[in-house]
Amino acid sequence: MLSWVDRMVRSTNPFVERMGFFWHRHFANSRDSVSPPQLLLKQNDLFRRYSDLAANPNASFRDLAYEVTVDPSMLRYLTGEYNVKGAPNENYARELMELFGLGVVDASGAANYSENDVRQLAKALSGWQINDSDPDAAKSYFTPDRWYNGPKIVFGKFGNYKQNEAVDLVLGHPAHPTYLVSKLWSEFVAAPPDAATLQGLVSAYTGSGLKLKPVLEKILGDKALFASLGELVMVKPPIVFVVSTLRTLGVGITDSAAADHLGAMGQTPYFPPTVAGWEGGLSWLNTNTALARFAFAGDALKSVKIDDVPNETASAAYERAYAAVGQPWLAPGTQTAIRDYAARAGSSNQKLRKERQLMLRTLMLAGPDGQVM
């Protein structure tokens, strides 16, 4: 887990890591249920490959879904390796529709799939196993004798489907494009897109053959992304808070403290609470997690050398702290409150001046405004 966090901190292209973590949350998978751990590391490489759109500009959600469906880590997590003819295991079929591809209901509230669709799709997904005798080279493989070789009816369509055809059925459902582009949008923009924007995203996605780059380019270029610059409104997930803080301070992972802090904040990579991943939003913030974020920022700052400046004024101390933490967004009221603290804090000796500077930086990084982006 810490190796991934450290990679996020040190990356020269943080977008790849951000999207890799998005896919980890979308196709949630837990170390609690997957062994050996190399399976998760291989899946992490898979997600990173579909996140590096400069190196892989033609990456599509269809191809990603094809690979995830038979990925050893996912087969183990959702017990797909036990899905055989005569005893279909419905776990992955259900989540492929409910969480990964469609959602339970469409915009009008109508069900996107039935229980029979789940059962029939599970039959199409049967027959896959994992060879992990060598964990570092673990692979999935198809065993024809374990596959349900017979008619299936999914969404009212008849066929003798296998795994890729099962994925195509889900991605061909009318609810899929809106579902996926809305999830991608909400990763970067707090307010939902208006109808015209949503239709434009859907058109970019479907018109490109479900490629990821066109729709992400439209999201990242949309004016809504910058609409809240004057007052940030999206709560930082713990991993974003931790990684952005360490990147700002120029501090890497040197011990296990970050894992403890992330656990206290409620988000540890490779350990989502459910197959739906993490809830996110305002659920990230409560009394305990807010204190955990403040404690993390304080610990991270201990790794940074803070020079003493004799006779430094309160205003100068504020400006030095503000520059040291990357000049983050601070609401006018927050600026006033922190400046007031700087004026009241002791500064008659080196120890007090260092404490003042440390607290100023901590307040800027981990106060209320530091929790949003």
Image: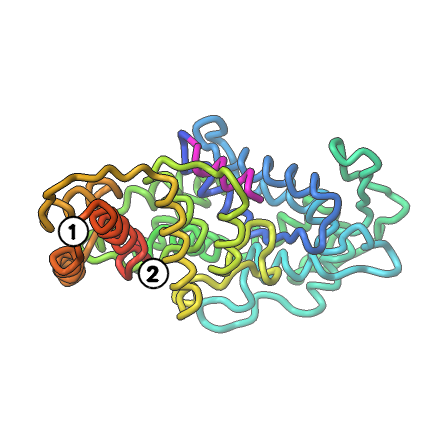
Looking at the rendered structure, the secondary structure element under dot 1 is loop
Residue furthest bottom as drawn: 109
Residue 192: mark = 2
Q: Earlier in the sequence, mark 1 or mark 2?
A: 2
Task: Look at the image and give the residue range highlighted in magenta.
Answer: 1-11
Query: Residue 125: percent from the left, percent from the top?
Result: 75, 51
Query: Residue 272: percent from the left, percent from the top?
Result: 58, 57
- Relative placement, left or right, of 109 versus 97 is left
From this viewpoint, is residue 226 visible?
Answer: no
Relative to 321, say whether 58 is above or below: above
Q: Is residue 267 magenta?
A: no
From this viewpoint, is residue 309 visible?
Answer: yes
Residue furthest top as drawn: 55
Most foreground residue, 136 or 263? 263
- Relative placement, left or right, of 261 versus 229 is right
Please name the predominant secondary structure of the magenta segment in the image: helix
In three-dimensional space, the C-alpha distance between marks 1 and 2, rounded to whole angstroms, equals 47 Å
Q: How many marks?
A: 2
Amino acid under disc 2 = Pro
Query: Residue 217: percent from the left, percent from the top?
Result: 35, 39
Residue at 69 percent across and 55 percent down: it is 32
Residue 237: mark = none
Q: Quadrant of the N terminus?
A: top right
Residue 347: mark = 1
Query: Residue 30: percent from the left, percent from the top?
Result: 64, 53
